Structures are given as structure tokens and as C-alpha cells.
Amino acid sequence: MPRRHHHHVYVVELSPDVLYEARFKKANPDYVRGKPCVYVGMTGLDPDLRFDKHKAGIQSNRYVEKFGLRLLPELYAVYNPMPYEAACEMEVELGIALREAGYGVWQA
């Protein structure tokens, strides 16, 4: 029996204060003021558990640890779960799509 797909893409809303971080701002030259700032990630864990680990500083992205507000499942739930390879590709595609929509995006 094939193994159940258990990888997920996820999107974390970041506080607008992340825009004061030079690296974040530089990575988002086409950011549209007022649009959300987000972190797009991929995990083999449940996105809720992964978010909790970020906030606790466990294998955390510094922007999520410091500025992470909440998950935005309306932006990713439709894709999950999926195989590892698909999740790797979707993480990149989702980040590009959100950036094109004017979001401020950070990816690991």
C-alpha cells in the first residue's frame, strides 16, 4: 500500500512591522502597500504544529518567530496534503503567485 501523502505548504501572516527589516524589504521591491506580508513554507508536519514550533524558536524562521501572527489556511489548504516533491514545487509557485499579487513574501 502506498504511503499516505503528508507534506503541506503553509502561509503565515507576518506583522507589517516586518517591512522595517531591510532584507525583507529588499526581497519585495514590488510590494503593494496595504497587502499582507507572509512567510511561505513547506513541512511534513501539520501546519498548526509547524507554526507553533516557529513561534517557540524550534527550527524557526526568524521572521515567523518575531513577526508571525497566524496561519492563512484560505491561501493553502486547498493544496494539502501532497507528496514531498509536489510540496517543494508548490512552495515556490505559491510564493511567486503571492508576490505577483503584491504580497510581501519570505521563503526559506
Image: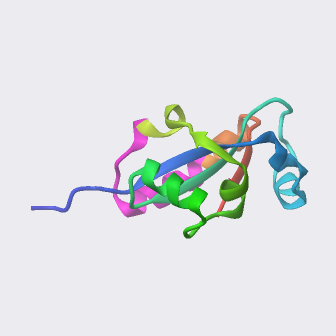
Residue at x 44%, y 54% (from the top left corner) = 49
Decide whether residue 90 is among the magenta residues: yes
Does residue 96 sit above or below 86 in this rendering? above
**Magenta span main SS:** helix
Q: Is residue 83 left or right of residue 30?
A: left
Question: Is 51 in front, or is 74?
Answer: 51
Decide whether residue 29 is among the magenta residues: no
Q: Which residues are magenta?
A: 78-94
Residue at x 65%, y 63% (from the top left corner) = 61
Q: Residue furthest front?
A: 56
Question: Is 88 in front, or is 38?
Answer: 38
Residue at x 80%, y 40% (from the top left corner) = 16
> Which quadrant of the view contains residue 62?
bottom right
Q: Is residue 107 left or right of residue 51?
A: right
Residue at x 83%, y 45% (from the top left corner) = 17
Q: Residue furthest left?
A: 1
Q: Residue furthest bottom?
A: 59
Q: Position of residue 102 (x, y in %)?
A: 77, 36
Q: Position of residue 106 (x, y in %)?
A: 70, 54
Q: Position of residue 3 (x, y in %)?
A: 19, 62
Q: Position of residue 43 (x, y in %)?
A: 45, 60
Does residue 69 sit above or below 65 in this rendering? above
> Which quadrant of the view contains residue 108?
bottom right
Q: Is residue 108 left or right of residue 1?
A: right
> Coloured how?
rainbow
